[in-house]
Image (tube, grey):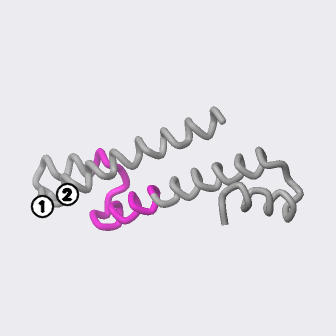
Amino acid sequence: MSVDALTLELENVMALPESEIIRKGLFALIEKEIRFAENEIAEIRERYDLLTKEKLLHAIQNSLVVEHPAWEDYIVWKNKEAHIARLRLAADHA
């Protein structure tokens, strides 16, 4: 089924205009992406039993954790937080 056909079908089923269906779909996608990124951060927190990326950085710098893969996890954590911030900003401007 094409996107146009699916949108038309949803307009009829949900009794919503196309623009509202698209808007709701985009917000749902943003929320899903945020949850996915937050889950990845939670896994890293659990792995090191630390609450912030700054505490992980401190642990790396003071040899309290093995550098590899801790550095990679720190970078992932930092990037995921930035990704979440960008997604929230996009949602706020929508």
Q: Residues within 10 Å of mark 2 (few under 14, many from 20)?
A: some
| Residue 58 x %, y % | 21, 47
Q: Quadrant of residue 2?
A: bottom right
Tell me the residue at 35%/66% (across/down): 46
> Which residues, given as a range, are shown in magenta?
37-55
Q: In which quarter of the image is residue 25?
A: bottom right
Q: Distance between the residues labelled 2 and 1?
A: 6 Å
Based on the picture, tell me whether residue 40 belongs to the magenta stretch. yes
Q: Mark 2 points at which residue?
A: 70
- In this view of the protein, which residue sits in the foreground, 73 or 83? 83
Dot 1 falls on a residue whose secondary structure is loop
Position of 53 relative to 47 (above/below): above
Dot 2 falls on a residue whose secondary structure is helix
SS assignment for the magenta stretch, majority: helix
- In this view of the protein, which residue sits in the foreground, 49 or 6? 6
| Residue 23 x %, y % | 71, 46
Task: Tell me: 21 left or right of 13.
Answer: left
| Residue 82 x %, y % | 41, 41
Q: Quadrant of the N terminus?
A: bottom right
Asked if the residue under mark 1 is in contact with the one under mark 2, i.e. CB atoms within 8 Å, the reply is yes
Position of 27 relative to 82 (above/below): below
Tell me the residue at 65%/49% (across/down): 27
Residue 5 image label: none
Disc 2 residue type? Answer: Ala
Task: Tell me: 72 left or right of 33.
Answer: left
Residue 66 image label: 1
Residue extending farthest to the top is: 93
Q: Quadrant of the C terminus?
A: top right
Tell me the residue at 48%/46% (across/down): 84
Task: Tell me: 31 left or right of 47.
Answer: right
